[in-house]
Structure formats: C-alpha cells, structure tokens
Image (cartoon, helix red, strand yellow):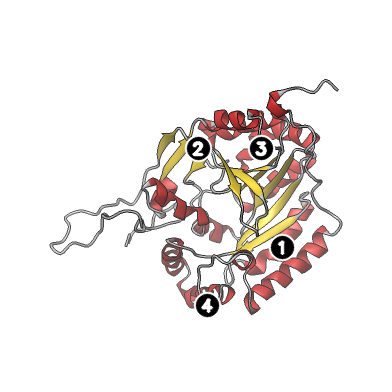
Amino acid sequence: MQTEYLKGRGAQMNTVNRFKRQELVFEHTEGLDEQLHEGKVATQIYTENSRSIINKVSSPDLGHMYSMNPYQGCEHGCIYCYARNSHEYWGFSAGTDFETRLIAKENAPQLLEKQLLHPSWTVNPIALSGNTDCYQPIEKTHRLTRQILEIFNRFKHPVGIITKNALIERDIDIIKELASDGLVHVFLSITTLNEELRRVMEPRTASSSKKLEVIEKLASNNIPVGVMVAPVIPGLNHHEIPEILRLSAEHGASTAGYTVIRLNGSIETLFRDWLIRNYPDRYNKVMKQIESMHGGSVNDNEFYRRMTGDGPVADSIKSLFKASKKRYFEGKGFPPYNLNLFRKGGNYRLF
C-alpha cells in the first residue's frame, strides 16, 4: 500500500489487473531497497488509432443509445468512477494508472465522420461520453472533442454531452449552433458542494461553484443544460441533493438526474482504501449503507437496481431526489432532439 498520500489523485494505489499473470508488488521476502512509487506520479499520454469509435448501448436501464469516447483513462481521478475497470483491457491498472496513463484516440473525429457518411447509418443521438470525460484536461491540447462537435454540427446530427469540467465553455460557439437546431443536450455533473470532499473524491474536476457558473453561461446561450448528482453516496453526499438541485435550477438548469454508487470490480478495493484514508470514522456506516442498496453487496450488475438501488436507504434517497426535483424543476425539462435535419451521406438539403 502507498503510505504517502498522493495529492491531486483519487486512487492511492494500483490494483491488480485481472488480465495479467504477473505484477509489481511492494512486498518481497528479502525486502526492497527502494519504493516502487514516489510521492508524485507523472501523467503519461499515449495515442491510439482505433478501428471504431461509436458504441451501441443495449442496457435496458440506459435505453437504446450510442456513445463515443475520444479518451481512455481520465485525469479527473474520481475515486468512484465505473470506467476504471475498463482500463484493465488496455493492460493498465484501474487505480493510479487510470488517472496517469491516458490514451487519446487521435482518429476519433475521422472515424465519426466515416460512420455518419455510411449509407446504413440511421440518425440517433450519440453521447459524449459513455465512459470517460470528453472534457478532461488533455482535451485542452488534443482538441478531439471540439473536432467531434464540429462534425456533429456539419452533419446536423444530435449529440448529448456530460462533463465535470469547465473546459466545455471553450466550445460554446459550436454548442450554441447545435442548440439552435435542437441538436444538443448538456449535463454538468455535480457530486458535492463540499470543496473539502470534492478535492479528495474527484480531485481534478472543476469546483462546484465553477460548474454552477458554467450551467448559467450555457443556459444564457439558450443551450439545454441539466445537472446530474452522480453518484449519490449515503453517508457522504446524499444530504446535499436538495441544495445541489436548488442552486442548479437557480443558475438555469432545466432538468436533473441521479445515480447511486456501486463498486464493481477493482473499484471496491480502491474505494475502501480511499474511504479509510479520508473518512475512517464513517467507513463502516458508508460501506454498510452501500451494501444495503445492492442486495447485500457493494457491486451490482442487476439492471435497473444497479443505477438507483433498492431497500430503505435507496428509497430514502429516491424520495429526497423526487421531492427536490418537483420543488425546483416542476414544469421544466429538455426539448426533444430534432432528428429531421441530419444530412445523410453528408448531403445538404435543397429545401
């Protein structure tokens, strides 16, 4: 276990990659002369030329949708992130590696354009992103998300965006054009208003006050924007739901959603380690309440239950969210996507 706390990182360790037969460990029968990790872990960026970029999502609790991810791994470092497990498919760990070994899919814009040009493609909203944040810090230099939005705008194709980063403000010019045609929905994810909690739980995301400013700026540009309280963690942030929804509505958000935490795969090990380091006094209570929402386990693959949980704790969260949404968002909502403007094959309409 890493003994020195890695500031600016969510995970404090690298978990075992289930696909690897060998691993580096700290323990050795004869002892080690040096530590395998220093107190600071540098970020490394790799490039990848993918074969495809659009993923069809068939999970019944998510609806029939498509998603695309220009990046793998995420420097935001959210300790609870379900995408951590997918990093193991690339030969990395779901722990510190997920935050520091990042992959940029450099040909993502070209692959998207190729897909939209295909004669068999039928217009359907595509989510940016289904896995990692499309506006994480490396987007500043790689600009893959901006290129992707330019393609959506050129083809008049609907897109959904969810992010925890204020970098989305950079692309308001394109997003505003998409919104004017009814082609975009945006969600800002606000997990907590407590900056002390945010700094250790999702260390490289924008502050809640900055996210609220972004919501206000998007709304003032007539861009449909909502807030996601995700994940809700009983004993840590569940009580913040009413205030998050109130402030989001006051800043112009049109709708709200939530999910509860679940700790599948390596995320359980990482979250337990993080929780006992940062909130040891709450450890037992938080873990027991998470288990109570998922049939006695902290992980959950059961459709519908995995997103909102069940049992008394989950019901309490659901009731609190429902009452808060009714109070602050009644009569509001997103306009439907416009599916009639798509330039199939890249062709412009004459009429």
Please identify, in this view, whether the residue under mark 4 or under mark 3 is nearer the observer: 4
Is label 1 in a helix, a strand or a loop? helix
As drawn, 285 above or below 341:
below
Distance from label 4 to label 2 (Cα)? 38 Å
Check disc 1 and give the amino acid type: Glu
Check disc 2 and give the amino acid type: Ile
**Which label was assigned to residue 243?**
1
On the rendered image, what quadrant is the N terminus found in? Answer: bottom left
Name which of mark 4 and mark 2 comes first in the sequence.
Answer: 2
- Examine the rendering and report whether any part of residue 193 can be seen: no
**Which label was assigned to residue 169?**
3
Structural crowding at the residue carrying mark 2, measured as other residues with C-alpha within 10 Å and reported as few (<14), some (14–19) or many (≥20):
some
**Do the CB atoms of the residues marked 4 and 3 lie less than 8 Å apart?**
no
Residue farthest bottom in this picture: 312
Residue 57's x, y, as percent? 61, 50
Distance from label 4 to label 3 (Cα)? 42 Å
Q: Which residue is mark 2?
A: 138
Name which of mark 1 and mark 3 comes first in the sequence.
Answer: 3
Q: Which residue is mark 4?
A: 296
Name which of mark 4 and mark 3 comes first in the sequence.
Answer: 3
